[in-house]
Image (spheres, rainbow, N blue to C red):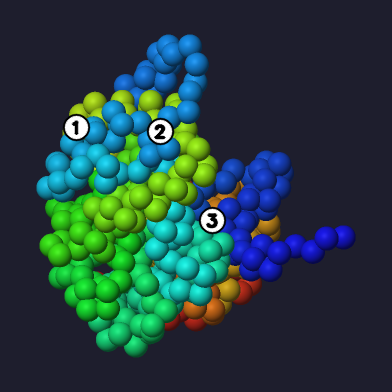
Amino acid sequence: MPAISARGKQMPASPIRKLVPYAEKAKAAGVQIYHLNIGQPDIKTPEVMLNAVRNFNAKVVEYSHSAGNESYRRKLTQYYQKYGIELDYSDILITTGGSEAILFGMMSCLDAGDEVIIPEPLYANYNGFSTAGNIVVKPITATIDQNFALPPIEEFEKVITPRTKAILICNPNNPTGYLYSEDELKTLREIVLKHDLYLFADEVYREFTYDGAQPLSVLSLSGLDQHAVVVDSISKRYSACGARIGALVSRNRELMATALKFAQARLSPPTFGQVLAEAGMEVPDSYFTEVNAEYTRRRNVLVEGLNNLEGVFCPMPKGAFYVVARLPIADSDHFCQWMLESFHYNGKTVMMAPATGFYATPGLGKNEVRLAYVLNEDDLRSALVCLREGLKAYPGRIAATKTPAAQN
């Protein structure tokens, strides 16, 4: 039998999806599952976008330009202008979801053996794409007791080597919901300029910020035109995850020309997805106002409910629609599987993502889970009841870690 590649063996399983077989068995047994494991919004995709696909009347579904339809890229420059970001349409390359943008960015900027510094907890697929490219992740650990704020600059300096080529952040953050401040972003600018690094910023949750907080793009920071690389996507912005349309954005012309070669190798991004995405430029701001208010309510229900559970601590996030909570357990992988395989309360249970998969440092996240507040308020309350009862019944429950007295 032929051998599987070492790269394939090293490829990490998704912490978000690896428990799906247990969920399927539970559903087959009649158990209702509250899916808090995955960022699949239940918000309706705007009708104007769906109609654009329904009314598609071309006689042939053709390849698009490898960088994406020019008409869509030009409209995207107007979208970024709303955030004070001036771009040429050639600074934008349309990708098959934000995932491909991450892949193209990494492949264009880092060689095998090069290092990328990423604050953890981190979006799990950063580990996966790094493994695929034989790129070394150097994690800098943010802690739940500090609400997952950016670690001090000294922590970054400690791990920088001649092989370090980039820093990668997600802002607002998946999985923690943390929103980096202007001061924190300026700290990162200082580091990348000092060491001549790329600064990758995954900004796909730009529209999801709360309590009056405003997102700041790395593209808005002065002096970073040759360093800043943004990953973007319509998946969460318009609740259009299945359209698979993202973007790689940078003013670095050599980088964009390099990324285009990778784009040409995969031919073109999805035609129907681009039709849908371009129509998204017509969606009024009122749509985002309503969605933001809905997620604010959901966030409050989930975070307050979690912190009312005995032994549970969850910081209040300022963005995205995720939280990382600390539970009185020793093994989050076992607990999340147990909740699907061995527990239900009145025929219902909760699916969560073990936080171990969101760390690059082995052994971290063992008492943490990520939850996505993508369900309505009533379902979130019911899920919290199931989690409460599950923690009571779980044979691996341990004494709770002391909860911080105050949150920032």
Q: Is the residue 162 above or below the residue 165 in the image?
A: below
Q: CA distance from mark 1 to mark 3?
A: 31 Å
Q: Is residue 322 left or right of residue 228?
A: right
Residue 69 seen in render: yes
Callout 1: helix, strand or loop?
helix
| Labels 1 and 2: the sequence-earlier one | 2
Q: Which residue is mark 2?
A: 65
Tell me what residue is drawn at x 27 percent, y 56 percent.
Answer: 252
Amino acid type, callout 3: Ile
- Give coordinates of residue 193: x percent, y percent: 21, 73
Tell me what residue is drawn at x 29 percent, y 36 percent.
Answer: 73
| Labels 1 and 3: the sequence-earlier one | 3
Could you say which is closer to the camera, residue 67 or residue 363? Answer: 67
| Labels 2 and 3: the sequence-earlier one | 3
Q: Is the residue 149 above or below the residue 277 in the image?
A: below
Q: Is residue 107 left or right of residue 77?
A: right
- Give coordinates of residue 15: x percent, y percent: 55, 60
Q: Give the label on residue 286, or none.
A: 1
Quadrant in which residue 241 is drawn: top left
Label 3 Cα crowd, 10 Å radius (few <14 / some 14-19 / many 20+): many
Amino acid type, callout 2: His
Tell me what residue is drawn at x 47 percent, y 49 percent.
Answer: 262
Q: Which residue is mark 3?
A: 16
Could you say which is closer to the camera, residue 192 or residue 286? Answer: 192
Amino acid type, callout 1: Ser
Q: CA distance from mark 1 to mark 2?
A: 32 Å
- Give coordinates of residue 32: x percent, y percent: 59, 43
Q: CA distance from mark 2 to mark 3?
A: 33 Å
Could you say which is closer to the camera, residue 315 or residue 191? Answer: 191
Label 2 Cα crowd, 10 Å radius (few <14 / some 14-19 / many 20+): some
Could you say which is closer to the camera, residue 271 or residue 360? Answer: 271
Tell me what residue is drawn at x 24 percent, y 61 percent.
Answer: 226
